Image (cartoon, rainbow, N blue to C red):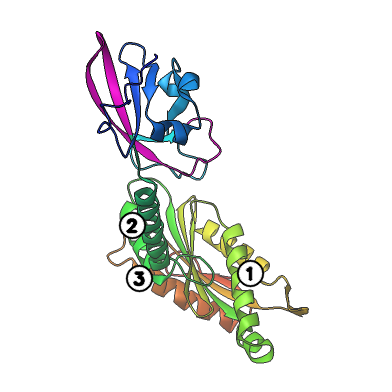
Amino acid sequence: METSFFSTGREGVAHESAALLVDARDLRVLDANPQALALLQCSRADISGRALSDLIEPCVSDDAGRSAPGADCYRLAGKDDSSRFYTMSAASFSHDGRAVVLYLLHDVTFWFRLKTDLTNRNLELSHLARHDHLTNLFNRLMFRDTLEMANARLGRTDGWLGLLYIDLDGFKQVNDQLGHDAGDDVLVEIARRLRDSIRTSDVAARLGGDEFGIILENLRAPEDALKVARHVVDRVAEPISVNGETVAVTASVGAAVADQPLAEAASLVASADRMMFEARSGGPGRAALASDINPGRVA
């Protein structure tokens, strides 16, 4: 093409936007304005006859789930600068006896980044509202809501709902002797051990201070809650290294179970809390299962 579609006489065509003139039949590029040539780092000779898909590609989500805003967002194909995002508008008409499409590229990087920042901020605020800021476990509010939903599911399928109430023994001494930063490190480690002690379908939460809770759904028998409680007791009792010091805390764990929906899901918490104190009365590092649901057991 000797004369450019964008030559003198058409200065007003896509004056500010990068523009591509494309054959409507096969979507091959016929011409480009100087803005498009600079953007694509090509000459008119290089770009003529190229497939539009060789130059512009739809944005695709990456492994982290990040994507462009909407299905009509594009990036420059084969360019190292994949951080720029564009939308395209199109106008179809006839030129020199053939059907053509004029594509205009609009840089929407600023808006995409703004939208991404707002989305990430909202996700962060939502996460903070549901999780404990120190241990990243569910907080008390989320624990309560999860328990109520689990209670509502009882009876629809076979299985028991279990709840563990965990209180640490000896944690105050860690704070008093090594300071609150060391105490925070201990809590973070205890939270990690709690997560490792349960199934992915179970829920662990920090209820406040050195108190934790675990929700266990679809247990085969009441004794399964006590088995998990004993495992928690053993894991918590393992020594913890903090700032070159080895500290040891233990856990008193109360367990309660139900196989039918309770009028108040919080009653399961009350039963497990009561059993935690019963377990502690026998000495630190013990677990007990509520006797009003199964014959009382302390171990």
Numbered tag placed on residue 267 in the rendering = 3
In the orientation shown, which residue stands out farthest toward the bottom? 176
With 173 as the anchor, is 90 left or right in this view?
left
The kind of secondary structure the magenta stretch mainly shows is strand
* Amino acid tagged 3: Ser
- Residue 297 location, x and y as percent? 55, 69
Percent of width and height locating residue 242? 72, 77
Left of 107 or right of it: where is 137?
right
Q: Is residue 80 one of those drawn in magenta?
A: yes
In percent of the image, x 29 and y 24: which residue is there?
Answer: 102
The nearer-to-camera label among 1 and 3 is 1
Percent coordinates x, y for residue 76 in the rendering: 46, 33
Location of mark 1 (residue): 189
Q: Is residue 216 above or below residue 98?
A: below
Instruction: Name the residue that disc number 2 marks.
Output: 149
Magenta-drawn segment: 76-104
